[in-house]
């Protein structure tokens, strides 16, 4: 295989890991930043929405710019901005300055998110087989490494400013060093598969409704992921009376299953196709969360949260892949739509479940993501379509999306 393509794939792994590490270091130091700025929990909750707003703005801007200048320019620029912005929360001294810092950090994160996913689509197109899910798994691994590094730094008394400045400097260095390995832009309107370039569908040639549907699916599935992030531990504590240490295992089980599942999903997608991954993954997620909700004890509830994570693991990456392949010359803009609406879903999940849990029990409120997973399973036919010739195998049935073909998204 082409050495440049191997290096391009390796560089994509680097940027996904870097993104996970940078944002993970921010999450680890949230309590220290909260204490340093003197904001309360309620104010911090609103400020975290500002971070989300910045990410959404960055995604919307980065999409067209990535299409215009190429991921080789957009990815290192977004990575450097995201890394540099990590310093700002440590320098904030009150709510307004922290809000401004979080908006810039979110903006950089949004730019990097769109750029690296667009480049991942370009790498996948060149490989001619699914490789997207592994990139998303490495993002999760980057977050785990950040949690471990942050814990060590805090245990040794390293101040928040020193920790975030060190991470920012290292992130900028990695962003610039890895840039040379990124793939050059493919000619506009070409797929660039190993089987030979094929003409792309004209922009807007009936793909807009399909991209809208993929974005809606991303919203639903990432809402489910957001629910697990913020409510899994609370479910074990409040519904089953588990102690705090045991309750924390719910999120650990979910996150571990998500990461391992994404490492395995590419091979599964190559065999059964993305539509099957989405359909049966969502069905497994719905069944797993239903089990967790109905469980009378902690152990079956943990099994349910594990199945929920395993089911969701490979779904969202299929949506990114489908959107990027639908129109190669507009991959950035389409990926931005998926990422933007998906990110809003991630933010909406905790916000929706909270009020519902006040009206009904938390168990009943958690039936909403069960329903959303079921709806997404029924919509999996959106991903049907033929695989690029270079990646075709006898077992392949529902391959990667090609321009102008109706087919499909973590």
Image (cartoon, helix red, strand yellow):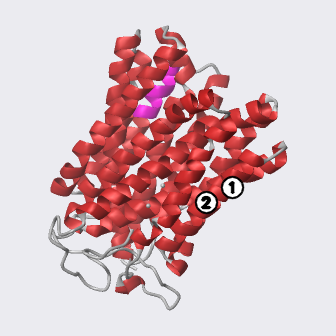
- Judge whether residue 98 is colored magenta: no
Residue extending farthest to the bottom is 394
Q: Main secondary structure of the magenta part?
A: helix
Residue 181 drawn at (x, y percent): 33, 60
Residue tagged 1: 288
Q: Residue at x 57, y 33 (%)?
A: 356
Q: Circle 1 — which element?
A: helix
Residue 12 drawn at (x, y percent): 40, 58
Relative to 260, 409 lies left or right:
left
Looking at the image, which is closer to me, 26 or 161? 26
Q: Earlier in the sequence, mark 1 or mark 2?
A: 1
Whether residues under marks 1 and 2 lie with C-beta atoms below 8 angstroms apart, the answer is: yes
User: Quick check: 325 above or below 107?
Assistant: below
Residue extending farthest to the front is 359
Residue 363 drawn at (x, y percent): 69, 39
Residue tagged 2: 311
Q: Residue at x 36, y 46 (%)?
A: 341
Q: Circle 2 — which element?
A: helix
Which residues fall within the magenta stretch? 159-168
User: Quick check: 81 above or below 321?
Assistant: above
Residue 150, label in figure: none
Relative to 358, 292 lies left or right:
right
State how many labels appear: 2
Residue 279 shows in this picture = yes
Q: Residue at x 36, y 77 (%)?
A: 2
Looking at the image, which is closer to me, 111 or 158? 111
Residue 372 drawn at (x, y percent): 52, 52
Looking at the image, which is closer to me, 210 or 410? 210
Relative to 45, 199 lies left or right:
left
Q: Quadrant of residue 158?
A: top right
């Amino acid at each position: 295989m082409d050495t440049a393509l191997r290096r391009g794939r390796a560089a994509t792994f680097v940027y996904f890991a870097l993104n996970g590490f940078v944002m993970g270091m921010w999450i680890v130091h949230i309590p220290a930043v909260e204490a340093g700025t003197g904001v309360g929990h309620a104010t911090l909750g609103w400020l975290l929405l500002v971070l989300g707003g910045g990410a959404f703005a960055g995604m919307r801007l980065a999409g067209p710019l990535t299409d215009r200048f190429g991921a080789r320019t957009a990815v290192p620029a977004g990575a450097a901005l995201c890394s540099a912005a990590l310093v700002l929360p440590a320098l904030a001294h009150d709510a307004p300055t922290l809000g401004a810092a979080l908006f810039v950090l979110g903006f950089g994160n949004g730019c990097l998110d769109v750029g690296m996913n667009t480049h991942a689509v370009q790498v996948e197109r060149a490989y001619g087989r699914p490789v997207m899910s592994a990139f998303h798994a490495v993002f999760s691994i980057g977050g785990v490494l950040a949690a471990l590094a942050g814990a060590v730094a805090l245990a040794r008394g390293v101040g928040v400013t020193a920790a975030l400045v060190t991470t920012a400097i290292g992130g900028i260095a990695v962003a610039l060093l890895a840039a040379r390995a990124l793939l050059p832009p493919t000619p506009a309107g070409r797929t660039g598969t190993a089987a030979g370039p094929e003409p792309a569908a004209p922009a807007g040639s009936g793909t807009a409704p399909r991209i809208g549907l993929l974005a809606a699916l991303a919203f639903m599935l990432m809402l489910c992921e957001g629910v697990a992030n913020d409510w899994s531990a609370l479910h074990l504590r409040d519904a089953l009376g588990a102690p705090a240490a045991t309750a924390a295992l719910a999120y650990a089980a979910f996150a571990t299953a998500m990461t391992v599942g994404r490492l395995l999903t590419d091979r599964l997608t190559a065999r059964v196709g993305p539509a099957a991954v989405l359909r049966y993954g969502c069905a497994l997620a719905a069944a797993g969360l239903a089990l967790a909700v109905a469980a009378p004890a902690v152990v079956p509830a943990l099994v349910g949260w594990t199945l929920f994570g395993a089911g969701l693991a490979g779904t969202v990456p299929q949506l990114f892949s489908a959107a990027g392949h639908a129109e190669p010359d507009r991959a950035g803009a389409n990926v931005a739509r998926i990422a933007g609406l998906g990110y809003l879903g991630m933010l909406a999940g905790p916000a929706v479940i909270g009020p519902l849990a006040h009206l009904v029990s938390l168990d009943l409120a958690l039936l909403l993501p069960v329903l959303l997973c079921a709806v997404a399973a029924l919509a999996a036919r959106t991903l049907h379509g033929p695989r690029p010739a270079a990646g075709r195998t006898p077992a392949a049935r529902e391959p990667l999306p090609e321009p102008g073909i109706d087919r499909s998204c973590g």
